[in-house]
Amino acid sequence: MKNTPNPNPHKLLLIDDDPNLILLVTDYLEFNGYQVLTASQGREALSLLETEMPDLIICDVMMPEMDGYSFVEEIRQNPQWNQLPIIFLSAKTQSHDRIKGLNIGADVYLVKPFEPEELVAQVKSTLNYSQRLINNNNGVVADMKRIQVPKSVELTPTETKVVSLVSQGLSNREISIELGVSQRTIESHVSNMLNKTGLHNRTELSRWAIQSQLV
């Protein structure tokens, strides 16, 4: 059964040059209560932003005319848009690609192919994080890129492996397959790391791992 319509849904901007992916992801996000605007590449998205202000942007990396990296650089340099949370979707899986994407200004780097449930979870988590920053700063959004944890935090070798895979955009199910353990075990490791670090979600955990060079 479809979810009860939200009278004030979050507005998302989805940018991808693959019409099939646009259709599938839009349907799934709308099913989960989000309003979705779409664009096929970066320049079209910039034009759309002149009249529409989304709550979050989901952007492919490899696109014609203006790729995702160039698009995000434009967003981060514009005072009107530079605090919008951004999720990258990419078929590029190497560590240097993820690091480049996050350093340019994306808040999440999700590797294709991905589970739709994982994307929805990342959207929800990132929106919640953005709202907490607004609430904590009396309406002034803080720098999302700065992640701090206690200096005394130490991870076990297994936790280090798990957080490295989390930072690659893998879901708990994919990590469990990669490491040959149960998904419940991975969920337990992630929960323990969140407790140790005082972070709130996988998005923050992923960014901290990359900033700390744990990947």
Image (cartoon, helix red, strand yellow):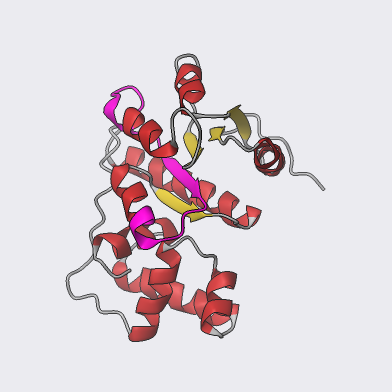
As drawn, 176 above or below 54: below
Identity of the residue furthest to the front in this view: 64
Q: In the rendering, at what x and y percent does residue 64 appear?
A: 50, 32
Q: Is residue 144 visible?
A: no
Work out which quarter of the rendered image holds the C terminus and state it: bottom left
As drawn, 175 above or below 208: below
Magenta-span inclusion, residue 93: yes
What is the quadrant of residue 26 in the picture? Answer: top right
Q: Is residue 145 visible?
A: yes
Q: In the rendering, at what x and y percent does residue 145 appear?
A: 28, 48
As drawn, 49 above or below 194: above
Q: Residue at x 63, y 38 (%)?
A: 18
Q: Residue at x 69, y 44 (%)?
A: 28
Magenta-span inclusion, residue 142: no
- Left or right: residue 22 compared with residue 54: right
As drawn, 56 above or below 201: above
Q: In the rendering, at what x and y percent does residue 203 appear?
A: 41, 56
In the image, the segment drawn in magenta is 76-98
Identity of the residue furthest to the left in this view: 151
Q: In the rendering, at what x and y percent does residue 159 appear?
A: 38, 79
What is the quadrant of residue 21 in the picture? Answer: top right
What is the quadrant of residue 39 in the picture? Answer: top right
Q: Residue at x 47, y 17 (%)?
A: 47
Q: Along the line of sight, which residue is nearer the eye, 14 or 151?
A: 14
